[in-house]
Image: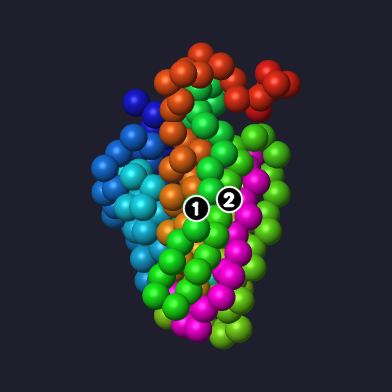
C-alpha cells in the first residue's frame, strides 16, 4: 500500500494526517477552518485518495500557521507514500471548469520545490478562509512534497468557484502525477536517476 501517516507538532500547530494514494476518495478532515476542510475533501475525492486530517492550530492568532502547515504535512505524506518514486508518471496537469470559472494546475514531483499560484481572488475572505493563504497552502505542499506546483485561474467571477476550481484541478493533476505507469514500473522517471 502506498500510504503514510504523519504526526507533526510545533508550538503553533498539531497535525495528524493519514493518506492512502490508492484509495477511493474517502475523507474526514477537521482543521478548524471550514472552507479549508471543504478544499481538503475535494483533494481526496478528485484525487482518488483516502485522507484524514486532524489539525489544531493557533487560530486565535491567525490562520496562516494552520493553513501552511497542513499543506506541508500533506506534501510530506505524498512524498513518504511515493517512496523512491519509481514507476510513477511524475507529472500531471488538468484544466477544471466550474460554472463560469476555468482553472488549470500542473504538478511535477521531480524533487525541486517551486510554486506559482494566480487565483485572481480579490476578496479577503472566501467562506471563513483568508483567501491569500491559498498560495501558502500550495507553497507548503510544494516544500513538503519536493514538487513544482503551478496553478492559475484563467477567468471567473465567483471567488468561491475560483478557489474550488484550483483545488479540484490540483487534485486531478496530482492524481495523474502519483499514478503508476505499468510500462515503466521499475524506472525512475528522470534521466538523472535521482528525484
Q: Residue 94 carries which label?
A: 1
Q: How many marks?
A: 2
**Is residue 28 on the magenta stretch?**
no
Residue 39, by quadrant, is: bottom left
Residue carrying label 2: 106
Q: Percent position (x, y) of residue 14?
A: 47, 53
Q: Quadrant of residue 118?
A: bottom right
86 lies above or below 16: above
Q: Dot 2, crowdedness within 10 Å: few (<14), some or many (≥20)? A: many
Residue at 42 percent across and 21 percent down: it is 182
Check residue 160 for magenta coloring: yes
> Which span of residues is magenta-colored?
145-161
Looking at the picture, does residue 3 appear above or below residue 157? above
Residue 129 visible in the displayed image: no
What is the x, y in percent for residue 102?
A: 50, 69
Can residue 187 be seen at all in this image of the molecule? Answer: yes
Q: Is mark 2 on a helix, strand or loop?
A: strand
Q: Which of 104 and 5 is in front in this view?
A: 104
Amino acid at each position: 500500500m502506498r500510504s503514510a501517516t504523519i504526526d507533526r507538532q510545533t508550538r503553533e500547530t498539531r497535525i495528524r494526517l493519514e493518506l492512502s494514494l490508492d484509495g477511493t476518495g474517502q475523507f474526514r478532515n477537521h482543521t478548524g477552518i471550514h472552507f479549508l476542510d471543504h478544499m481538503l475533501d475535494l483533494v481526496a475525492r478528485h484525487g482518488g485518495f483516502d485522507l484524514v486530517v486532524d489539525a489544531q492550530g493557533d487560530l486565535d492568532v491567525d490562520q496562516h500557521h494552520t493553513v501552511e502547515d497542513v499543506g506541508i504535512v500533506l506534501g510530506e505524506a505524498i512524498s513518504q507514500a511515493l517512496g523512491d518514486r519509481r514507476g510513477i508518471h511524475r507529472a500531471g496537469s488538468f484544466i477544471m471548469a466550474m460554472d463560469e470559472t476555468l482553472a488549470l494546475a500542473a504538478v511535477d514531483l521531480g524533487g525541486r520545490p517551486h510554486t506559482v499560484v494566480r487565483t485572481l481572488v480579490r476578496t479577503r475572505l472566501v467562506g471563513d478562509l483568508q483567501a491569500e493563504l491559498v498560495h501558502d497552502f500550495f507553497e507548503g505542499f510544494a516544500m513538503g512534497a519536493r514538487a513544482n506546483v503551478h496553478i492559475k485561474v484563467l477567468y471567473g467571477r465567483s471567488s468561491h468557484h475560483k478557489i474550488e476550481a484550483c483545488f479540484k484541478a490540483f487534485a486531478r493533476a496530482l492524481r495523474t502525477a502519483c499514478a503508476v505507469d505499468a510500462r515503466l514500473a521499475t524506472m525512475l522517471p528522470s534521466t538523472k536517476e535521482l528525484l
